[in-house]
Amino acid sequence: MAKYRSHLPQLDDYPFLTDSGLETTLIFQEGMDLPLNAAFTLHATDAGERTLRDYYIRHVEIARAQNAGFVLESATWRASTDWGTKLGYSYSELTSFNRKGIALMTSLRDEFETPRSPMPISGNIGPRGDGYFPEQQMSGDEAQRYHAFQAEIFADTEADLISAFTMTHSGEAIGIARAAASVGMPVVISFTTETDGRLPSGETMREAIDKTDEQTDGAPAYYMINCAHPAHFADALANGEAWVKRLRGIRANSSMRSHAELDNSPDLDTGDPVDLGRRYARLRGALGTRFNIMGGCCGTDHRHVAAIAEACLPRRAVA
């Protein structure tokens, strides 16, 4: 039975951390081969499971040290049918991988959760296409049909919510929100932006959030931004408009490079963890305690999350 599905603890403005750039950490820092950036394939072996477990533990321990919550995101960003087919997996195998993703998060919660560090489990969904370039923009109906596969699996696990990351256009976000709502799951939508603060589709953040809310009856519990450096989108959040209040979290890149530059780069730009932490602190100061979910994306690792925690979260004494 899902523990937090009926009330997500991160909606109470309590500070939460989450993990960082899983795929870039494993590929560039640990020398692993992840075809198509598909980290879910590590669930195929005991050694792969241990690798994932060790990665998450490094991040969980930072949250526990700060007495902050932690959102456990399953490694299922690429575990949808189109990507699975490209990797040679059947529907039944993909179903198993998605279930194993949630099972690992459940075991981590059982071992590490404390009263001061609640740990909701999120079933992670990624874009149907490339996370940088939306060659095929889907309608809400098409996206709902496509993403129902993972949504239905997660609804039958201990996952507390579904989170869609690196959304490049509103149509896919609308479809995922509808798919989650149809199976009774809370849903979070995280858009990515280009260096001008707009989505790869050309939509502004305001347009994408307003359209998604309008066409889903406000289904998303909240919104996030991921896979962009704060310098790319901070100005768009400074206008104080109503849509900004729908944002609760950021998983930023450490690099200021554009998506095109990152896609063609042979090396990993890890940026400056301390500078990234300071930028988060400025955003938290401007947006208030509603901005309470903080992690990283491409190029970041547990050191960046630690720097973000140090900059944003004062040491919290255990009651």
Image (cartoon, helix red, strand yellow):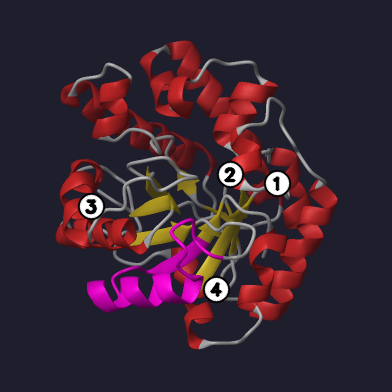
What is the three-letter code of the residue carrying label 1? Arg
Q: Residue 149 versus residue 130: which sits nearer the camera?
A: 130
Q: Are marks 3 and 2 in contact (CB under 8 Å)?
A: no
- Mark 2 sits on what residue? 19
The segment highlighted magenta reads: 198-224
The dot on residue 143 is 3
Residue 275: x and y in percent read 83, 55
Residue drawn 38% across the image and 34% down it: 78
> Image height check: is 97 above or below 61?
above
- Mark 1 sits on what residue? 257
Q: Is any part of residue 80 visible from this angle? A: yes
Q: Is residue 128 magenta?
A: no
* Mark toward the viewer: 3 or 2: 3
* Mark toward the viewer: 2 or 1: 1
Judging from the image, what secondary structure is the residue with disc 1 in? loop
Q: Is any part of residue 317 visible from this angle? A: no
- Mark 4 sits on what residue? 13
- Crowding around mark 1 (Cα neighbors within 10 Å: few <14, some 14 to 19, many 20+) is some
Of mark 3 and mark 2, the one earlier in the sequence is 2
Q: CA distance from mark 2 to mark 4?
A: 18 Å
Q: Are marks 2 and 4 in contact (CB under 8 Å)?
A: no
Q: CA distance from mark 1 to mark 3?
A: 29 Å
Of mark 1 and mark 3, the one earlier in the sequence is 3
* Mark toward the viewer: 1 or 3: 1
* Mark toward the viewer: 4 or 3: 3
> Image height check: is 241 above or below 116?
below
Q: Are marks 2 and 1 in contact (CB under 8 Å)?
A: no
Q: Residue 162 versus residue 314: which sits nearer the camera?
A: 162
The image quadrant of residue 173 is: bottom left
* Mark toward the viewer: 4 or 1: 1
